[in-house]
Image: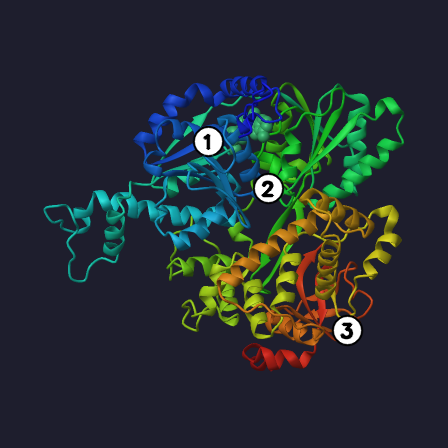
Amino acid sequence: TPNPSANGNLSFNHNNNNNNKPNFFARSRKILEQRKSLPIASVERRLIEEVRKHDILIIVGETGSGKTTQIPQFLFNAGFCRGGKTVGITQPRRVAAVTVAKRVAEECGVELGQKVGYSIRFEDVTSSSTSIKYMTDGLLLREALLDPYLSRYSVIVVDEAHERTVHTDVLLGLLKKVHNVRSKYIRDHTSVGHKRTSDGAILEKENADPCISVLKQCEGRKLPPLKLIIMSASLDARVFSEYFGGARAVHIQGRQFPVDIFYTVNPQTDYLDSAIITIFQIHLEEAPGDILVFLTGQEEIESVEKQIQDNLRQLPEDSRKMSTAPIFSSLPSEQQMRVFAPAPAGFRKVILATNIAETSVTIPGVKYVIDPGVVKARCYDPIKGMESLIVVPTSKAQALQRSGRAGRDGRGKCFRLYPESEFEKLEDSTKPEIKRCNLSNVILQLKALGVDDIFGFDFIEKPSRAAIKRSVEELILLGALTDDCKLSDPVGHQMARLPLDPIYSKALILASQFNCLEEMLIAVAMLSVESIFYEPREKKNEARTAKNCFASPEGDHLTLINVYRASNDLLEKRKSEVGKDKHEKILRKWCKENFISSRSLRHARDIHSQIQQHVEQMGLCISSCGDDTLQFRRCLAAAFFLNAALKQPNKTYRALASGEVVHIHPTSVLFHTKADCIIFNEFVKTSKEYIRNVTIIDGFWLTELAPHYYARQE
Ligand code: ADP
Ligand code: MG
């Protein structure tokens, strides 16, 4: 037998974590030092005592004090994960869940997905050994559908509660309920009139409290009470404390250096231009230190990033030492960590971020903040039933959080791109999202969780009656709810299971009947990401020519499908060139040549494979309508009949459901076509009321395919 060590050399298997990290020990020592120096490190014991004493605890602490990364580790060390239980931490944003989980895995010296993992929609990096699990608040809501008492969790930490996203608000309501069931009822069973047998089991009474079945299940599974921790960066803990019956709130001292605030002398007409000018002014005139710029979305970030690169090329060689790092929610997860890496020696890093960098993630090294004073927010008109994303001024609280980011490591500067007089006009704080969004998604989930009385649900802040009513009506029209507001079978249940907006779920279910589920899966995946096409300012014509190669005369949905299929064909053709990396490269090059955002396309491809799994599990039939695109457009009409619009004599359109006058967005392939009847998927309000993602349909289809809506109106 051959002796593997015959030549006298033994090869050793190195611990996986240390592979290709020669400075592993130096790095882990540095991380330990960083952890120890965090303000929260000195209060570990006291915090754990508080958690033991209080089932519900509110923790308020300045951004960067170590709440998100450290508290779950404290809980783990204190034994809260014994017996295979999990500490779950919810985040409003995907990026935060992912980057924080990666950081904590590194701090613990473990592989991501083992002891520390994350789970977000369309991406689950956990295993049976995961004890510390970061996830989005929306994801935990979905888990509750399968596990109503969240039985695998011993502690749930609701992080960034001050953000008051619609999912956070609903989650708080749900957790309050689960908490009551898991602790109060179990302990004080006699106080609600349940007797126990000698071995402690609950005796069933006649006309038993509906909680009995819940109690029995809890007992059967030996559920410990659920610990709830609500974390917030806003100093005002009152609203949470009151909501949880006067729950205890503790404050953690932060560490903050002074930040000098600068305002522009005059109002700015183009904040992107102003931001770019300010970036270069800082770069050329100010001391070393990284710059954090707040922008409203991926499109803006990518365009500013390009502009910076172009401007840099015009500077003398020795002034070009600047690197850019974007961070926004649909950035592929392997690119997200780049933002934390220090710039090369002598370089200045410019971080281009959405409001994710406001409180969710803290990036070390920032000395300068540029704040255009705007943010993209959801906004809903319950009378018209129209939800849109619009760019609005930030609140004062947001402006303060943003400027605070400059004072983490030392004295900093914040440049607000508006005059000081404007600051005074800002709202004090942001209105909770639940008050300004379409609620059909939330209501569908609550119904699936067994909450029948939506009006009576214990929301931390109640959405308006009009908004609830409108959204319930919409769900009835989509067939998710019956006329008496019960979840319909099977459609409502199927819709609740799909991790998509109800209207998209409905489109998929219908598509299996219209024999075009293959097309609809692609369309929904492509519609789930921010703009696939990009158009650099200085290459508008080239970009448009490239786009025309994919354009379908029938509309944007088929155009998007063409792009997706072209990328499939490309990868198929070059299948023989092995390796995932190689394929990545091929795809990136092709995207660049065709003015397609490779990030968006990749994201869409991921989403596609995830939704495909879901619909396969549901047993829907995936078939293609082939060249019969009429079939696909009929299906679009059947699904999106609430978003139909008719051409007016003056060439504008009138949205049929809302009566609103709308305009086809210039990026649509139908911008010049002006068909008589169209459906659209997105309503955006900028300088005008625009609709995006538009396809031509036949007006008669509406009465044929959605008679319950259109016949009624006539
Ligand atoms: P909080 O939740 O209180 O805002 P965090 O726990 O998020 O604070 O952050 C604590 C510290 O950890 C911050 O100083 C931050 O810069 C650092 N940190 C977090 N994630 C990373 C990362 N991926 N790389 C380097 N430092 C990080
Ligand atoms: Mg945090």
Q: Residues within 10 Å of mark 2 (few under 14, many from 20)?
A: some
Of the numbered discs 3 and 2, the one sitting upstream in the chain is 2
Q: Residues within 10 Å of mark 1 (few under 14, many from 20)?
A: many
Tell which tag, 3 or 2, sits nearer the viewer. Answer: 3
Which quadrant is the C terminus positioned in?
Answer: bottom right
Tell me which amino acid carries mark 2.
Glu
Q: Residue at x 53, y 62 (%)?
A: 615
Q: Residue furthest left?
A: 198
- With 626 as the anchor, is 232 left or right in this view? left
Q: Residues within 10 Å of mark 3 (few under 14, many from 20)?
A: some
Tell me which amino acid carries mark 3.
Ala
Disc 2 marks which residue? 427
Q: Is residue 465 visible?
A: no
Q: Secondary structure at mark 3?
A: loop
| Separation of marks 1 and 2 at Cα, in angstroms | 22 Å
Q: Are marks 1 and 3 in contact (CB under 8 Å)?
A: no
Q: Looking at the picture, does residue 457 appear above or below residue 583?
A: below
| Separation of marks 3 and 2 at Cα, in angstroms | 42 Å
Check residue 276 in the rendering and tell me which mark sits there, or answer none.
none
Q: Residue at x 60, y 53 (%)?
A: 607
Q: Secondary structure at mark 1?
A: strand
- Please identify the quarter of the rendering in which residue 447 is found: bottom left
- With 638 as the anchor, is 278 left or right in this view? right
Disc 1 marks which residue? 60
Q: Are marks 3 and 2 in contact (CB under 8 Å)?
A: no
Residue 306 lies, in percent from the top left, at: 80, 40
Of the numbered discs 1 and 3, the one sitting upstream in the chain is 1
In front of the other: 419 or 708: 708
Disc 3 marks which residue? 675
